[in-house]
Image (tube, helix red, strand yellow):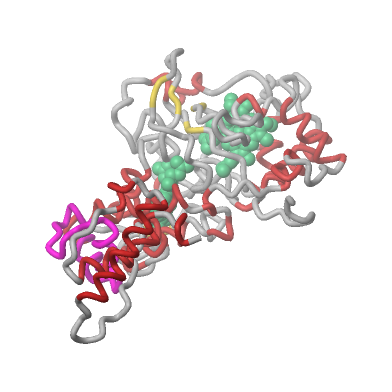
Amino acid sequence: MTHSRPCRHALPALLLSALLTIPLAGCGGGGGTPEAATTTQDATADAAAIRPPRTPQPAPVPVPTLAEVGSRLFDDSRLSASGTLACASCHAEARGHADAAGTFLPLGGADGSHQGLRSSPSVRYLDQAGAFRFDAQGRPRGGLFWDGRASTRAEQARGPLFNADEMANADVAALATRLRALPYAADLRAAASLPAAATDEQLVDAATTALARFQADDARFHPFTSKFDAVQDGRATFTAQEQRGLAAFNDPQRGNCASCHDSRPTAGVGRALFTNFSYHALGVPRNRSQATANPAFFDLGLCGPQRSDLAGRTDFCGHFRTPTLRNVALTAPYFHNASFATLEDVVAFYATRDIDPARWYPVVNGQVQLYNDLPATLRTNVQQGAPFRRAGQAPAITPQDAADIVAFLRTLTDGFTASPPAQ
Ligand code: HEC
Ligand code: HEC
């Protein structure tokens, strides 16, 4: 068994040999073959026999991986200016790695009283998002955040760390000071192969890379352990209602949900992600928040204000990235502006947005304020077509379909255990 150990397990031996100043080939050179591992261990044993240390050396501590350090950083509120906010505060594992509060837009900032602009999304199942791009038809795809403005997780992590409404570090130097003060600062440097005299920028880089590696490597960010997965694997069966819900979800004439929240296995993953990472303006109602207290303020997603490179593409104003629906039963409130509290309401909104608009938008002097979270000139950007139906038409989604779809969405929660695991 020892012979097939991967390189990482040979590290303590390597460290010990480094202490003894016996030069040895590194992991890379031997290609991690059983022979290389054996040679390393034998050589270490020989070295210890030839030149025993004068005082007993403490057992060498293995160098933690970047992902291991990232796991500690993710939970560490000492990275924030207030000292109270960690990544995990807004991306709680128990809630599908979305907002722990589950009620409204997250609070942050140096004094914990600033309200963010957008709902905290689940940070699971983002591995296939890819960098923000335009596809062959010129449609925007991928990227991280509701508006896709970050192309990698490491780049993304700088967002909350320096956002004045979130973890509120004033600058790179301020965050580097916080990183140096961590009890595991040496582990961060070791994992990133940085010297003790690492610069501020190097330390911040190491921290964001570690956070990214943790989310990429740790199975908890892509477990695929929902009932839906178990059914796909033949380990469980849907109830009749869940089965009807999936059919309505997929049916282009009814929910048409799968046209954006793709329910087919994604190539290279073998599992459905329930998003195709496309962008759309759904015209969700305006929510009350610190930002929207100013009636002239509009969060326009792709065309700003959080990103500015597409400000000229007014055809994209109001477009936000399609989120995964995995764990959606845990991640209320819904939509980029947290304007919906329940899945029942979300599905009813898709069914009757334009048929019964007074249910969703305020009525002022007898006038329904349709699509009221967009300036009047941009309301033509709002998505039409299935499942949306025009005023006077019958809904594409019946109340029975809606109840069935909600039952189906509840099968997308990770950690399904009702039947024994495979094998
Ligand atoms: C105060 C709450 C808060 C904190 C703290 C926070 N986030 Fe977020 N996170 C959000 C919000 C809100 C968004 C969406 C923002 C947007 O789209 O503009 C988000 C988005 C993300 C995304 C992109 C998700 C997607 O669907 O594209 C990732 C990844 C992420 N956060 C990781 C982190 C990491 C890592 C940390 C710690 C360094 C962190 N967050 C700290 C609230 C928070
Ligand atoms: C045209 C593409 C499209 C179709 C069709 C579609 N969605 Fe969505 N869905 C989106 C986009 C885009 C968002 C985010 C919009 C926003 O926040 O402004 C979203 C958001 C959601 C959310 C909120 C998730 C969260 O984390 O906040 C749920 C739930 C949802 N959709 C369910 C459905 C269901 C159920 C159907 C079918 C009845 C459906 N969607 C049809 C594109 C679509």
Q: Is residue 236 left or right of residue 357?
A: right
Task: Name the foreground residue: 300 vs 367.
Answer: 300
Q: Please give left or right for residue 247 compared with residue 328 in the image.
A: right
Give the percent coordinates (x, y) of residue 208. Answer: 31, 52
| Residue 167 picture quarter | bottom left
Residue at image position (32%, 48%) is 30
Above-or-below relation of 8 to 152: below
On the question of residue 133 being in view, the answer is yes
- Tell me if residue 290 can be seen: no
Point 21% across, 66% down: residue: 18
Viewer-side residue, 192 vs 92: 192
Quarter of the figure with residue 133: top left
Q: Is residue 199 on the magenta stretch?
A: yes
Magenta stretch contains residue 138: no
Residue 123 pos. (x, y %) = 49, 48
The location of residue 217, given as percent across then percent down, is 45, 50
**Magenta-colored span:** 175-203
- In this picture, is 386 found above or below 25? above
Which quarter of the figure has residue 419?
bottom right
Which residue is the extreme one toward the right? 240
In the foreground, 401 or 219: 219
